[in-house]
Image: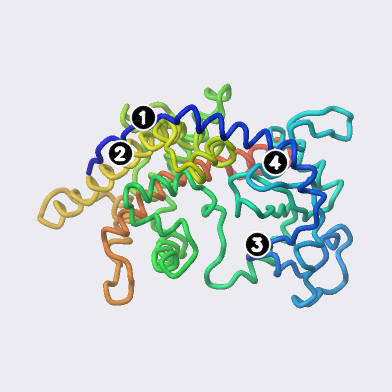
């Protein structure tokens, strides 16, 4: 259950200077590259855009057949793009409609509405670290356009998780079986289907929802006292919600009543996610990883945080499984919440003949879920808060239902 510390490799100065020179050259020549006609390599979903990108501005009376999809090259470019650096050179001093100039990629809350007003709900630009190095990324900010993709993507859909190369690098380095979930082929499907079934089907959900609701109630009571740092509060509340689902108990992270080791897991997870997301689009990190094959100090630190988080999650699953085995041997029984937890239910209902996933793989999937759920759930709750803040009448309805 432990891994030797990865040897820390410092990046040679000559490589760093070469990378900086490459980035500088790219900025100088990016305009020339953008002016040259070059074929675009559309992503897998490009052919599924069933209507013209302008269509959602004034929705037509009837759907246009899938065969009428435009080629990817006809989708408007919000900014020019160059290999590896993407649209970064043009984003650094992006001019907004109010006349101000600032880095577009560091002001997404202002950039995305601005680009939609200019180019419609579907457009393309180069985002370093996302997609293929030489291909643009397609931005879709209309749910009606996105639903076309979801309905047409087939049995092996593309997911944003495939672009999270820092997490994927760690999973591959540790030979973790859940690295298959970072792709979209048959191995992904083999592990994903049982996970999806046991987590989202109505029957298992009816078992774990009461414990999740109790964790939400306890977290809600602590929200007002932690309003000064909602990012941390939402991360801890999300940890409580998913630990209730997966393990059948709230960790008390949101209320501050949890054990030190529980709070440390939250902190390690939060720090890892804070590092991982910017690293995905950091030109220096991308060059070191994909071109020079060098592990930077930042990547080494991230891998250490991920190790700590997964060691904790593995200890939690082992403790609950040991309690289940002890109960079967005549020891204290599991609580109702523990018995209905995702972990216990998944292990109890796994059919070795029908489910093409081993028990060890299933345990690792649960570990990854406990880690990955913190950021995604916190983001969802955060946006719910934003929308509620804009709709006082909805707040009143919720208070009336409480």
C-alpha span from label 2 to label 1 = 9 Å
Quadrant placement of the N terminus:
top left
Q: Are marks 2 and 4 in contact (CB under 8 Å)?
A: no
* Place of residue 235 in the rendered image (x, y in percent of width and height, measured from the top left): 49, 35
* Place of residue 223 in the rendered image (x, y in percent of width and height, measured from the top left): 53, 29
C-alpha span from label 4 to label 3 = 32 Å
Q: Earlier in the sequence, mark 3 or mark 1?
A: 3
Q: Which residue is mark 4?
A: 387
Quadrant placement of the C terminus:
top right
* Marks 3, 1: nearer the viewer: 3
Circle 1 residues within 10 Å: few <14, some 14–19, many ≥20: some
Say left or right for 188 vs 17: left
- State the residue at coordinates (62%, 37%): 22
Circle 4 SS class: helix
Q: Nearer the viewer, residue 264 or 327?
A: 264
Q: Which residue is mark 1?
A: 264
Q: Are marks 2 and 1 in contact (CB under 8 Å)?
A: yes
Q: Which residue is mark 2?
A: 312
Residue 220 visible in the displayed image: no
Task: Judge whether 350 appears above or below 325 on screen.
Answer: below
* Marks 2, 4: nearer the viewer: 2
C-alpha span from label 3 to label 1 = 39 Å
């Amino acid at each position: 259950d432990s891994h030797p510390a990865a040897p820390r490799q410092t990046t040679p100065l000559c490589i760093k200077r070469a990378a900086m020179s490459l980035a500088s050259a790219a900025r100088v020549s990016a305009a020339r590259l953008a002016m040259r006609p070059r074929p675009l390599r559309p992503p897998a979903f490009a052919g599924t855009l069933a209507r013209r990108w302008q269509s959602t501005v004034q929705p037509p009376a009837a759907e246009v057949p899938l065969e009428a999809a435009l080629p990817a090259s006809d989708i408007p470019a919000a900014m020019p793009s160059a290999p590896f650096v993407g649209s970064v050179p043009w984003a650094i001093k992006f001019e907004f409609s109010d006349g101000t100039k600032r880095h577009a990629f560091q002001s997404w809350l202002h950039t995305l509405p601005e680009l939609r007003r200019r180019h419609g709900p579907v457009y393309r630009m180069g985002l370093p670290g996302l997609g293929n190095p030489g291909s643009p990324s397609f931005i879709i900010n209309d749910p009606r356009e996105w639903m076309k993709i979801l309905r047409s993507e087939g049995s092996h859909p593309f997911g944003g998780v495939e672009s999270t190369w820092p997490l994927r690098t760690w999973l591959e380095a540790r030979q973790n079986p859940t690295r298959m979930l970072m792709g979209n082929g048959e191995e992904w499907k083999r592990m994903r289907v049982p996970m999806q079934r046991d987590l989202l089907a109505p029957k298992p959900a009816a078992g774990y929802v009461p414990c999740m609701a109790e964790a939400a109630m306890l977290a809600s009571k602590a929200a007002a006292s932690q309003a000064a740092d909602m990012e941390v509060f939402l991360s801890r509340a999300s940890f409580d919600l998913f630990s209730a689902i997966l393990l059948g108990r709230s960790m008390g992270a949101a209320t501050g009543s949890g054990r030190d080791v529980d709070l440390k897991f939250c902190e390690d997870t939060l720090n890892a996610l804070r590092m991982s997301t910017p690293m995905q689009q950091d030109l220096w990190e991308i060059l070191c990883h994909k071109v020079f094959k060098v592990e930077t100090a930042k990547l080494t630190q991230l891998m250490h945080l991920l190790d700590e988080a997964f060691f904790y999650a593995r200890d939690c699953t082992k403790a609950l499984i040991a309690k289940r085995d002890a109960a079967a041997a005549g020891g204290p029984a599991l609580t109702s919440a523990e018995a209905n937890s995702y972990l216990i239910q998944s292990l109890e209902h796994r059919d070795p003949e029908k489910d093409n996933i081993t028990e060890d793989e299933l345990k690792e999937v649960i570990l990854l879920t406990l880690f990955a759920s913190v950021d995604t759930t916190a983001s969802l709750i955060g946006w719910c808060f934003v929308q509620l803040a804009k709709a006082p009448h909805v707040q009143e309805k919720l208070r009336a239902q409480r």
